[in-house]
Image: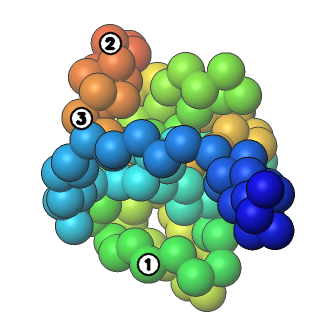
Amino acid sequence: MSPLRPVCLLLALLTGCAAPRPPTTEASPFELPAGSPRNIRVGFVEAAPPDSRQFPFALIPGTIIREGYTVVSRDHDLRPTAVLTITQIQGHIALANLVRGRPRPKDEVVLPSTELTKTAEALLPASPGS
């Protein structure tokens, strides 16, 4: 028996059998990595008077948004609660006009995906007097 045989056997057991891998397709640079959220979180709704049509929300540091952007607030179950349009940004606070629905304090505010936008369109439009 060769002295190399136990070493070769040990190496074979440690490395296992190498099965050929199927060819992989190169991922598009425009695709989100697996497990990434589809809606980018930009902040959280702050308290506002009950009859207000404008809602402040605290921006997450590093968030880059602009006036005129449409955002969606959603609850902890990720259901949309309101559609808002950003009207003013000062520091880490953004002020947004209500378009549909009614946000609640601590709802998260996200840049909506197409799917979330369609779901949010089912919310009731904001009435002029509210």
Q: Residue at x 27, y 64 (%)?
A: 68
Task: Specify the farthest residue to the bottom.
Answer: 91
Do labels 1 and 3 touch, CB within 8 Å? Answer: no
Above/below status of 82 relative to 47: above
Going from N to C along the chain, the mark reached first, 1 or 3, is: 1
- Give coordinates of residue 32: x percent, y percent: 35, 54
- Give coordinates of residue 33: x percent, y percent: 41, 54
Q: Which residue is mark 2?
A: 122
Q: Which residue is mark 3?
A: 114
The quarter of the image holding the N terminus is bottom right
Q: Is residue 4 visible?
A: yes
Q: Is residue 127 visible?
A: no
Name which residue type carries label 2. Answer: Ala
Name which residue type carries label 1. Answer: Ile
Above/below status of 95 relative to 55: below
Q: Residues within 10 Å of mark 3 (few under 14, many from 20)?
A: few
Do labels 3 and 2 touch, CB within 8 Å? Answer: no
Q: Residue at x 33, y 72 (%)?
A: 67
Q: Which mark is residue 64?
A: 1
Q: Residue at x 52, y 75 (%)?
A: 63
Near-viewer residue (104 or 24): 24
Q: CA distance from mark 3 to mark 2?
A: 13 Å
Task: Name the mark nearer the viewer: 2 or 1.
Answer: 1
